[in-house]
Image: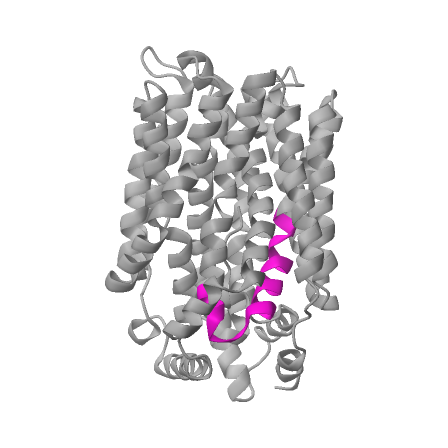
Amino acid sequence: MVELAGEDARQTASETPVLRRRYFMKATNEADLELAVIGKLTRRLLPFLFLLYIVAYLDRINVGFAALQMQKQFGFSDAVYGLGAGMFFAGYFFFQVPSNLALSRVGPRRWIAALMVVWGMVSSAMVFINGPRSFYALRFLLGAAEAGFFPGMILYLRNWFPARARAEAVALFMTAGPIAGVVGSPISGALLGLHSQHVSGWQWLFLIEGTPAVLLGVVVFAFLTDHPESANWLNGGERGRLIAALKRDRDSHPEAGQREIFSAFTNWKIWVLIIVYFGATTCSYGLSLWLPNLIRNVSKADNFGIGLLSAIPYVATAVAMVLVGMHSDRTGERRWHLALPAVGGAVGLWGVGFATSMAAQIAFLSLALLSAFSMMGPFWAVANALLGGTAAAAGIALINSFGNLGGFLGPYIIGLLRNATGEFKGGLLAVGAMMALSGGLAIVVGGVKPARKRLREAVTQ
C-alpha cells in the first residue's frame, strides 16, 4: 500500500499542475531554469524508482496468490495463512528504525541496493517453505528486509527534489502500489500454472518474482547517485541551481530537536491519526493479501482467470487514487475527502462479506480497495497541516510505524474468523468496523485546510 509521505507531502499538490505545465516551457528566468532542472530529475529518476516500488509491493502481496496452492499442499488453516501473511508487518515494524539508522550511515544508494538484493533472496527462498514455522520466519524476514526501502526512497527524493516539487514526485512514486496489483495479478495467476516434477506453481511464483529485486539491486548501485554534487548527468549550471534550491529548503526547515521529537509522542492528535491510518492499512492489506481467495470463493475461474479478475480492483484504485487526490488538492478540502472514502471502504467491506455473485464481489472489492488507497493523499495532507513545525518529522514517523501494524491485523483477523466460522463475513465486518471508526475520527481531526500561501507563490513566480 501507499505509505509514509512525510514532510515530502508538506507542499500542497495545488502547486503541481503549475509545475507540470512549466516543466516544458522555455526557460526565461531563474525560476524557470530551476523548473527545467526539476523536469530533468523527473525524467531521469522517477520512472526507475517507480519500477523499484512496483517490485517491492509485488513481493509483499504475491503470497496471496501462492496461498491458492500452498494452503492445500501444507494443510494451512486460514488462521495460519493470515498470521503468516501479516507477519511481514511485524518484521517491518521492528526493523524500520534500525534500517533507517543504517541508511543514514552508508547512504541511500548502497543501502537500498543491499536491501533489494536481500529481500529478493528472501522472497525467492520462500520456495523452501515446508510448514507454518518456516512460513512465519520467512515472511518476518521479508518484512525486516523491506523495512528500510520506502523511508530510503523518501530520503532519496528529499535529497534531490526541492520542496516545491517534492509532493508531486512522492505522489507519482506512491502510485506504484496499485499499479503493482494491476501488473502483478495476471502474472502471478499465470505463474501458478507452471509445474515441474519437483517444483510447484507457487514455488515458481516466488522464485521468478523474487529475482527482479536481486537484479535491480545491482542496477540501483550502478545507476543511482546519492547526491546532486556528484551527478555527472547534470551540467555545472544545473547542479548549482539544484544545490542552491535544496540549501534554501534546509535553511527554512531546520531539523527537529529532542524536545520537538518528544512532543510528538505526547500529542493526542498524532494518536488519533494513528488510529485513522491503522484502519486504512487494515483494509488495504487485509484485502490485498486475501484478494485471490475472496475471488475464488464466488468464482469458478482458474488461477489465471483469478489473476485477471484481481487486476480489476487495482485498476479502479489507481484511477480513484489520482482523482480523489486531485479534487482534494484543487478544493483545499481534506476532512470529507478523508472521511467519505473511509465510510465507502466500510460499505465495500461489508458488501464483500454478503456478496454472492462474481459481479457484486468485484464491485464491492473495488469500492473497498479504492477507498482505502484514496484516503492516503488527503490523510498525509491533514497530518502535515495538523502537526507542522519541527515536530512533524517525528510525528509522521510515529504514525507510519504504528499505523502500518494494520497490515498485520487485517490479514490475520480475516483468516482467524474464517477459520472459526467457515466464512469470510466475520473478518470483513470487523475490518469494515475499523474503517468506519477511521472515518469518524477523520471528521474530528480532518478540519484543517492547508495554507494557500505556497500556491500564490508558485503561481506568481
Q: Is residue 408 above or below residue 132?
A: below
> How is the structure coloured here?
one colour
Percent coordinates x, y for residue 116 in the rendering: 32, 46
Residue 35 shows up from this direction: yes
Residue 288, percent across and down?
Answer: 55, 35
Find out whether residue 358 is within the magenta segment. Answer: no
Q: Kindly report the secondary structure that dominates the magenta region of the rendered protein.
A: helix
Where residue 245 sits, quadrant-wise, is bottom left
Part of the protein shown in magenta: 373-394
393 within the magenta span: yes
Q: Does 415 appear above or below 346?
A: above
- Residue in front for this viewpoint, 398 or 114: 398
Which image quadrant: the C terminus? bottom right
Quarter of the figure with residue 181: top right
Residue 343 appears left or right of 102 = right
Residue 347 in the image: above or below residue 4: above
- Name the residue located 54 percent from the left edge and 36 percent from the top edge: 410
Tell which of 151 and 257 is nearer to you: 257
- Asked if one can make out residue 218 in the rendered structure from this viewpoint, the answer is no
Q: Position of residue 327 (x, y in %)?
A: 73, 61
Farthest residue to the bottom: give it.
Answer: 29
For image coordinates 68% across by 66% down, the residue present is 329
Q: Residue furthest top?
A: 197
Where is residue 163 shown, x and y percent of the image? Answer: 50, 74
456 sits to left or right of 60: right
